[in-house]
Each structure stands twice: as C-alpha cells, then as structure tokens.
Amino acid sequence: MKITRSSKIQGLILVATLSIGLGFVFPVSAQANPYILDINSKEVIDLGTL
C-alpha cells in the first residue's frame, strides 16, 4: 500500500479534528468534581462545588 501525500494530509486533518473535539469534552467533565491529592498523607480531598 502506497502512502501518498494526500493520505498524510487527510490523516493530519483527522487527528486535528479529533483533538479539537476531545478538547471541548474533557475540560467540562474535569470541572464537575474538583479534587486535591495530598502527597504527604496520600489522601484525595473532595473540594465540593467551588
């Protein structure tokens, strides 16, 4: 199978589109439950709603 320049560009466009799409989803879900990891006591502290 030959890899042509147009297939490389199509792959780049696909990766860019998926990256942009995931960029809109994950920050919203990450802000739903904020936590702090205490390294000294190795506990996870729930901050609740900020």
Image: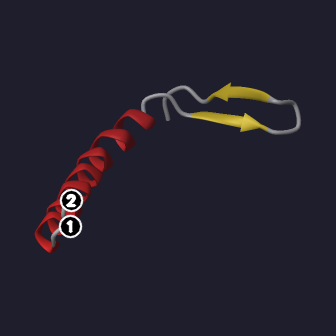
Disc 1 packing (10 Å; few <14; some 14–19; many ≥20): few
**Residue at x-position 23% and y-position 64%:** 12
Q: How far apart are marks 2 and 1 (CA)?
A: 5 Å
Depicted 8 relative to depicted 34: above or below? below
Residue 26 appears in view: yes
Give the colour scheme of this rendering. Answer: secondary structure
Describe residue 16's horizontal placement relative to residue 5 as left or right.
right
In the picture as drawn, the residue positioned furthest to the front comes out as: 1
User: Residue 28 appears in which quarter of the rendering?
Assistant: top left
**In this figure, what is the number of numbered marks?**
2
User: Are discs 2 and 1 less than 8 Å apart at CB?
Assistant: yes
Q: Which of the pair 34/23 is nearer the observer?
A: 23
Label drawn at residue 28: none
Label drawn at residue 8: 1
* Residue type at the position of mark 1: Lys
For disc 2, the marked residue is 11
* Residue type at the position of mark 2: Gly
